[in-house]
Image (tube, helix red, strand yellow):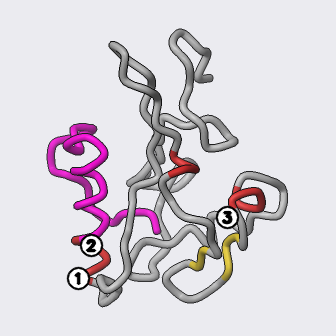
């Protein structure tokens, strides 16, 4: 799900553990807290610490949105043409659509630190 609320501190999510805790808390409040929820985030390698790839943090699938629609059945599907991730299916934890680019107001942009294949950007890589 796309989170309906952030940390209250802008992009400071408290690292991967803090971001995961936000997801878990929001899922719990929406009645889906019995599952483990992880933020779809990657981190770059820094100071001898290995990069973390979002695709390696989220399990093997399948993934469904809050209304039960299948988004993808495998990691390969999620990062390829078979993904059913659209504006209509990328719902928040309550099953509501999220205003994004092109909507007024734009309430959410997804910034994951990940390339299209779910891996972290390398140092100095172009993110445009």
The residue drawn where x is 77% and y is 61% is 77
The residue at which mark 3 appears reads as 85
> Pointer 1 and pointer 2: residues touching (CB < 8 Å)?
yes
User: Residues under labels 3 and 2: Cα distance?
Assistant: 20 Å
Q: Dot 2, crowdedness within 10 Å: few (<14), some or many (≥20)?
A: many
The residue at which mark 2 appears reads as 26
The residue stretch that appears in magenta: 1-24
Q: Earlier in the sequence, mark 3 or mark 1?
A: 1
In magenta segment, residue 16 = yes
Does residue 110 lie above or below 35 as drawn?
Answer: above
> Pointer 3 and pointer 1: residues touching (CB < 8 Å)?
no
Secondary structure under the numbered disc 1 in the rendered image: helix
Q: To which quarter of the image does residue 27 belong?
A: bottom left
- Residue 127 horizontal side relative to residue 45, left or right: right
Residue 5 point in image, percent of width and height: 27, 61
The residue at which mark 1 appears reads as 29
Q: To which quarter of the image does residue 41 belong?
A: top left
Q: Where does the C terminus fall, quadrant-wise?
A: top right
């Amino acid at each position: 799900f796309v989170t309906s609320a952030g940390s209250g501190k802008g992009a400071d999510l408290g690292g991967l553990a803090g971001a995961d805790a936000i997801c878990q808390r929001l899922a719990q409040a929406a009645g889906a807290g019995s599952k483990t929820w992880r933020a779809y985030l990657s981190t770059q390698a820094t100071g001898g610490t290995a990069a973390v790839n979002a695709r390696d943090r989220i399990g093997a699938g399948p993934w469904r949105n809050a209304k039960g629609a299948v988004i993808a059945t495998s990691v390969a599907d999620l990062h390829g043409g078979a993904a059913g991730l659209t504006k209509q299916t990328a719902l928040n934890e309550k099953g509501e659509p999220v205003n994004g680019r092109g909507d007024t107001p734009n309430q959410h942009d997804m910034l994951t630190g990940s390339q299209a294949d779910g891996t972290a950007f390398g140092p100095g890589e172009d993110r445009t």
